[in-house]
Image: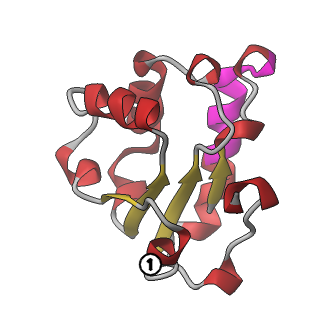
Amino acid sequence: MVVVGAHFLLRCLDLERFVLYVVKEFEPLIQNPYTIVYFHSAASLQMQPDLGWMKRLEQILGRKHQRNLHAICLHPTFGLKTAIFAMQLFVDDVVWKKVVYVDRLLQLFGYVPREQLSIPDFVFQ
């Protein structure tokens, strides 16, 4: 599953409906090993949910969604790395150990083959 931070418009988003959408979309994926890829290129830290909402999402998804989670690959900016560091207090250690920072796309392709990813052009810049 690929998530692009620049497409995440928090002020236009009903977060509860978004959680339900994520759960619905995850159901077919979690039956097998899967990886979440997050690109923060061209995204704003002001446009992301607060830490309380992130904790709520983790509670809703629960252990069932963690079982087959292979990795969470993050292509972050420095600002996102700082925000994620603060999230360590709220995120389950089982999930936290699966977080992988990828500074270059070639690193990412070691986790997920390039042909399996839909990557926006601006991420390559």
Residue 94 inside the magenta-drawn segment: no
Where in the figure is residue 3, as x and y percent of width and height? 64, 51
Does residue 83 lie above or below 12 as drawn? below
Q: Which residues are magenta?
A: 12-22
Q: Which residue is mark 1?
A: 111
Where in the figure is residue 12, as x and y percent of width and height? 81, 18
Does residue 24 lie above or below 70 as drawn? above
Q: Quadrant of the C terminus?
A: bottom right
In-front residue for pair 111/18: 111
Residue occupying the far front of the picture: 125
Q: Residue at x 42, y 36 (%)?
A: 78
Q: Residue at x 34, y 29 (%)?
A: 82
In-front residue for pair 33/106: 106
**Magenta stretch: dominant secondary structure:** helix
Please state which amino acid type lies under the numbered disc 1.
Tyr
The image shows a total of numbered marks equal to 1
